[in-house]
Amino acid sequence: MTAITILSEIGPDISVFPSSKHLVSWDGCCPRNDQRNQKVKSRRISRAGSYLKPLLVQVANALIKSKKYPEFKKRYHRIRSHRGRKKAVIAVCKMFLTAIWNVISKQESYNPDGFLEHRPVNESKILIKS
């Protein structure tokens, strides 16, 4: 049922969204960028996607508790430690929508390798005490 609802909300033609960022913005799962003069005015989530966003939040809560997809759980715990629970759930929703866009537009199965890759530390930026 969830997949049918998501596909009916997005529509049959995914080419309407040139990138996954357009889909995420259309659904309202990205924070506003309201920054002026080095002051952050607002990071609230937009009110768009009033039908799809609650469904994605339920899916995100299920993915966080799942042992089958550890990449979602790791991202949730990393963001929750410094942003809070609700923003971390929305970040998992954004991650899930990005995965949906990639699966539909590229016509290939889900692969978590992009989310689980380890980024090497840049060793040239080591601070030395003097």
Image (cartoon, rainbow, N blue to C red):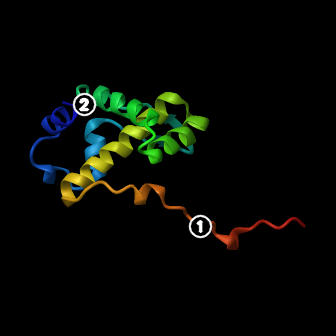
Q: Mark 2 points at which residue?
A: 52
- Snapshot quadrant of residue 112: bottom left
Residue 2, numbered circle: none
- Which of the two residues, 118 or 17, is positioned nearer the viewer here? 118
Q: Can residue 43 be seen in this view?
A: no
The reply to whether the C-beta atoms of the residues labelled 2 and 1 are less than 8 Å apart is: no
* Residue neighbourhood size for the residue with mark 2, other residues' Cα within 10 Å, grouped as few (<14), some (14–19), many (≥20): some
Q: Which amino acid does label 1 sit on?
A: Pro
Which element type, helix, strand or loop, lies under badge 1? loop
Residue 120, numbered circle: 1
- Left or right: residue 76 compared with residue 25: right
Residue at image point 22% right, 32% down: 2
Q: Residue furthest right?
A: 130
Residue 18, image x, y percentages: 21, 55
Q: Is residue 115 visible?
A: yes
Residue at image point 55% right, 39% down: 77
Which element type, helix, strand or loop, lies under badge 2? helix
